[in-house]
Amino acid sequence: MKILSEYLKSLVKGFDPSRPVFFRKNVTDCEHWGDMADARAGVEEFIAPYGGEISDEYWDGNDCGEAYIECKVPCGRAREVMESGFFYYDPWQ
């Protein structure tokens, strides 16, 4: 479990509880759509217990290019997801 910084704690406090919170996971070393499918499955498996779902995905089509998966979770579960350390970027609404 990751200890949240004061910044992240304040970020969570500022979220609107009626709206979902979004997270982004980079797909490293993405060479083909199979890599995207594998990453998507991993993110889906991780976020399902939190009531989350995939909201977007992107791959620029280049070997080791830009690729990521975005998902959303209910606001009430955002802190738990942040503490897991699964995502590298700050969440947003």
Image (tube, rainbow, N blue to C red):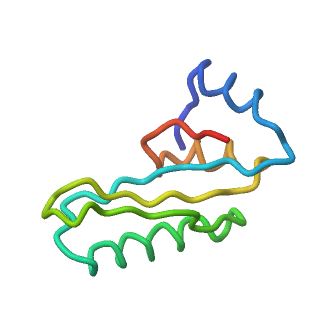
The image shows residue 76, relative to residue 53, as above or below, that is above
> Residue 23 appears at what percent x and percent y?
55, 49
On-image quarter of the N terminus? top right
Measured from the top left, where is residue 49 in percent x and y? Answer: 67, 68
Position of 14 compared to 47: left or right? right
Residue 55: x, y in percent? Answer: 58, 63
Image quarter of residue 60: bottom left
- Residue at figure coordinates x 61%, y 49% from the top left: 22
> Which sits in the foreground, 54 or 49?
54
Judged from this view, the residue extending furthest toward the left is 63
In the displayed orientation, state which residue is furthest to the top: 6
Query: How far across and down, in percent of the image, does residue 48 sit?
Result: 64, 71
Q: Nearer the viewer, residue 47 or 31?
A: 31
* Image height of 54 relative to 79, above or below: below
Residue 37 appears left or right of 79: left
Is 54 or 44 nearer to us in this picture? 54
Which residue is located at x 76 percent, y 47 percent?
75
Residue found at x 54% / y 66%: 46
Instruction: Name the quarter where the C terminus is drawn.
Output: top right
Residue most toward the front?
60
Q: Say which residue appears at 20% left-offset and 75% top-offset.
A: 32
- How many numbered tags mark residues here? 0
The answer to whether residue 12 is above or below residue 85 is above
